Each structure stands twice: as structure tokens, then as C-alpha cells.
Image (tube, rainbow, N blue to C red):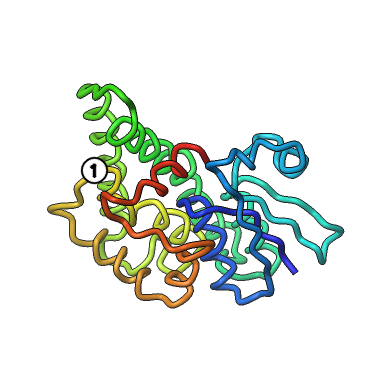
């Protein structure tokens, strides 16, 4: 049994989509980001950085794992799924996972802050993060050209990147003029496990009225 401490954010969705894809037993423990529950002493024992998501593997001596990318790798290695056994192929998947962790996530996160929530609109900051997000999207576009998934076979790299890229409208980043990327977004959106994973712990529609989503994206 896996305990999953999470909230409805892209990083949280990465883990619940993965768990749904694997079909292994897990229990959701929702974390109230608005109440700063992730900063409480008990949570900091699980993740000293005070961020969601965190999993605790009850079948492995209550082993706790924080950082969403590390969780994906742990679950893939534990189950032997969604990460190739071949070292070179596994490295390729890991590279695209790190691409999301080091690029897509941080840049879209900053775009969310300056485009939506910062009290003062700073056009230069908004333009910078929108431009960098679009550049990263174009990197994904080139990689996806001629293939269905980032590393040919569906993997944790697709899960990690999709959970962020799917909210590009919320971040104010256009995908106009791209073709492989939108098709890939739709391809993953059609997967039942992806549909279930992004509804945990609660569905968050991607429209301008979704105030709670914005608070969680900033506070996670």
C-alpha cells in the first residue's frame, strides 16, 4: 500500500496519474495548501522542504519519498514499469523527466505567478517567462515530431511533462502553430488513468474562475 500526500497541482497529478497507470493500491491523504498544512511539523518529517507530493511505501518499511520526479522513478523501479530496463533507453526517459523538473515546471510556475497572481503586472517578467515556456514547448514539439511519445514508448517522461503542459492556457502560453505537441496532449488526455489521476484529490477545471488552482500552484 502506498500513502500519497497530495493536492490538486501539476506535481501532485504526476504521482496520482502514475499510481493510476500502475494500478497498485494506494490511499490519498489530501493536504490543505491554503491552510499551509504542508508546513506543519508532522509533514516536515516526511518532506523537510515542505512541499507536496510525498509518498510513503507501507510495504517497504514506511519508506518516504519526496520530490515528484524522484517519486516517479521510485515507483517505476519498484514495479518495473514505465521506465525501460535498458540503461540507454532508461537514460533517455530520465533526461526528459529532468527536462520537466528543471525547465517546464519552474518556468511555467513563474509564468503562473507573474501572469496571474503577482499584485503588480510587470510586462518584462511576463514576457520573459512566456517566451521561455514557449521555447521549451518548441523543444517538446521537435522531440515529438514523428513519434507518439517522448521516448517512443509511453513512460514517466510523458506523465511528468503532460501534467504541466496541459495547463498552458492557465499559464497564458500559446501552443498555436504547433502540431505534434497538441496531438500528444490530446493523446494522453484520452488515457483513462490520466483522466482519473488529474481528478485527485479534486477536479480542477482549467478556466479563469479557478481561483483555488492558482492558490495551490503558488503555495505548493
Look at 54% across and 62% down and name the residue there: 201
Rendered location of residue 116, percent (x, y): 30, 36
Look at 65% across and 62% down and name the residue there: 75
Establish if 53 lies above or below 184.
Answer: above
The reply, left or right, for residue 165 in relation to residue 33 is left
In the picture as drawn, the residue positioned furthest to the right comes out as 61
Q: Which one is in front, 75 or 42? A: 42
Q: Which one is in front, 114 or 99? A: 114
Look at 32% across and 71% down and name the residue there: 187
Which quadrant of the view contains residue 57? bottom right
Rendered location of residue 30, percent (x, y): 61, 56
Q: Which residue is mark 1?
A: 172
Q: Which one is in front, 107 or 214? A: 214
Which quadrant of the view contains residue 40? top right
Rendered location of residue 141, percent (x, y): 26, 54
The reply, left or right, for residue 110 in relation to residue 155 is left
Look at 42% across and 56% down and name the residue there: 163
Rendered location of residue 164, percent (x, y): 39, 51
Amino acid at each position: 500500500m502506498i500513502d500519497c500526500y497530495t493536492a490538486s497541482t501539476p506535481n501532485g497529478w504526476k504521482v496520482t496519474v502514475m499510481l493510476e497507470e500502475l494500478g497498485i493500491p494506494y490511499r490519498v491523504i489530501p493536504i490543505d495548501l491554503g491552510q499551509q498544512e504542508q508546513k506543519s511539523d508532522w509533514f516536515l518529517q516526511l518532506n523537510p522542504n515542505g512541499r507536496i507530493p510525498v509518498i510513503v511505501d507501507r510495504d517497504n518499511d514506511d519508506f518516504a519519498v519526496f520530490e515528484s520526479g524522484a517519486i516517479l522513478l521510485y515507483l517505476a523501479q519498484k514495479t518495473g514499469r514505465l521506465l525501460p530496463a535498458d540503461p540507454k533507453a532508461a537514460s533517455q526517459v530520465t533526461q526528459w523527466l529532468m527536462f520537466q523538473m528543471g525547465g517546464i515546471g519552474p518556468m511555467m510556475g513563474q509564468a503562473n505567478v507573474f501572469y496571474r497572481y503577482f499584485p503588480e503586472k510587470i510586462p518584462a517578467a511576463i514576457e520573459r517567462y512566456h517566451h521561455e515556456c514557449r521555447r521549451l514547448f518548441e523543444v517538446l514539439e521537435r522531440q515529438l515530431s514523428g513519434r507518439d511519445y517522448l521516448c517512443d514508448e509511453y513512460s514517466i517522461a510523458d506523465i511528468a511533462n503532460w501534467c504541466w503542459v496541459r495547463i498552458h492556457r492557465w499559464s497564458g502560453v500559446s501552443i498555436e502553430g504547433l502540431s505534434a505537441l497538441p496531438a500528444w496532449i490530446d493523446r494522453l488526455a484520452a488515457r483513462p488513468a490520466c483522466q482519473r489521476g488529474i481528478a485527485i484529490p479534486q477536479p480542477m477545471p482549467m478556466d479563469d474562475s479557478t481561483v483555488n488552482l492558482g492558490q495551490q500552484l503558488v503555495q505548493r
